Image (spheres, helix red, strand yellow):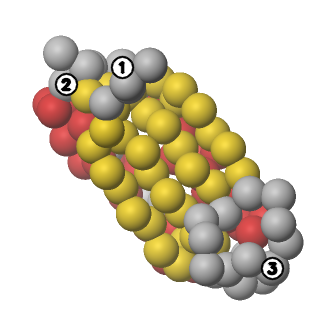
Amino acid sequence: MPITFAVLLWPREGREGEFLAYEDDALALLREHGGRLLSRVRRLEAGDHANPFEIHVIELPDEAARERFEGDPRRAALADRREASVAQTVMWRVEDVT
């Protein structure tokens, strides 16, 4: 059964460009583990650091696929870029209620 997550992301201040490049590369790996990016939205208000900069809704086939994605060595190789550009991440398992 597919599992769905909402991922709230805050970039480090002044590192938004690096953050976007990192996220593009990390999300590209998602498809290789059977995952889908259902939505990627970005806030419009500049300078609002209290709220997430981007919210992703992702779906993976199952928990094993999530573990493979999170453990992918190519994703691990991006860790320095993540550390340099991502200030905070909050991830919740969610379900569609529409």
Residue found at x 63% / y 55%: 54
Residue 97 placement (x, y as % from top left): 37, 24
Residue found at x 82% / y 58%: 44
Q: Secondary structure at mark 3?
A: loop
Answer with mark 3 or mark 1, whichever residue precedes in sequence. 1
Answer with mark 3 or mark 2, whichever residue precedes in sequence. 3
Residue at numbered disc 3: 47
Q: Secondary structure at mark 1?
A: loop
- Cα separation, mark 3 vs mark 1, equals 35 Å
In which quadrant of the rendered image does the C terminus lie? top left
Packing grade of label 2 (10 A; few <14, some 14-19, many >=20) is: some
Answer with mark 2 or mark 1, whichever residue precedes in sequence. 1
Packing grade of label 1 (10 A; few <14, some 14-19, many >=20) is: some
Residue at numbered disc 2: 62
Quarter-wise, where is residue 11 in the image?
bottom right
Q: Nearer the viewer, mark 3 or mark 1?
A: 3
Note whether 95 is above or below 44 in the view shown.
Answer: above
Task: Identify which residue, 61 or 80, lies in the foreground.
Answer: 61
Report whether residue 81 is seen. Answer: no
Residue 33 placement (x, y as % from top left): 34, 26
Residue at numbered disc 1: 34
Residue found at x 75% / y 69%: 16
In which quadrant of the rendered image does the N terminus lie? top left
- Cα separation, mark 3 vs mark 2, equals 37 Å
Q: Secondary structure at mark 2?
A: loop
- Cα separation, mark 2 vs mark 1, equals 9 Å
Quarter-wise, where is residue 4 in the image?
top left
Tell me which amino acid carries mark 3.
Gly
